[in-house]
Amino acid sequence: QIDEVRRLESDLPPRHTGLQLTTPLQARLRELQPVELDVLQLALNLGTVGTVLDHSSATDLDTTQALVSLLQRDYLHAG
């Protein structure tokens, strides 16, 4: 699991990078899994990659997978 997290982290921006909701949001929220919704909420409330990873109640692997997915599917953008 640690190796998988490290591999996925290479797909993430640096920990200090801010996260913002993509607007206008084209992707449907109803298509998100519960862990993705939780990570999206953390991103909106906490604002950076590092704080999302540090404060998520999901496993490191699930949180990292969700964050990568949200960025790749244009729910969030880094900046």
Image (cartoon, helix red, strand yellow):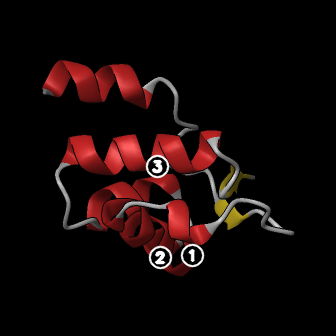
Percent of width and height locating residue 67: 46, 49
Q: Quadrant location of residue 58?
A: bottom left
Query: For the residue marked with disc 2, what is the amino acid?
Result: Gln
Residue lying at the far left of the rendered structure: 1
The residues bearing labels 2 and 1 have C-alpha atoms spaced at a distance of 5 Å
Q: Which residue is mark 2?
A: 41
Callout 3 crowding tier (Cα within 10 Å): few <14, some 14–19, many ≥20: many
Percent of width and height locating residue 56: 27, 65
Q: How many marks?
A: 3
Q: Is residue 76 left or right of residue 57?
A: right
Q: As displayed, is residue 51 above or below residue 68? A: below
**Mark sitting on residue 44:** 1
- Residue at 35% across, 19% down: 7
Q: As displayed, is residue 33 above or below residue 72? A: below
Q: Which residue is mark 3?
A: 67
The residues bearing labels 1 and 3 have C-alpha atoms spaced at a distance of 12 Å
Query: For the residue marked with disc 1, what is the amino acid?
Result: Leu
- Residue at 55% across, 51% down: 70
Mark 2 and mark 3 lie on one chain; the one further toward the N terminus is: 2
Q: Quadrant location of residue 1?
A: top left
Q: Secondary structure at mark 1?
A: helix
Percent of width and height locating residue 29: 58, 70
- Residue at 57% across, 76% down: 44
**Mark sitting on residue 14:** none
Q: Is residue 50 left or right of residue 77?
A: left
Mark 2 and mark 1 residues within 8 Å of each other at the beta carbon: yes
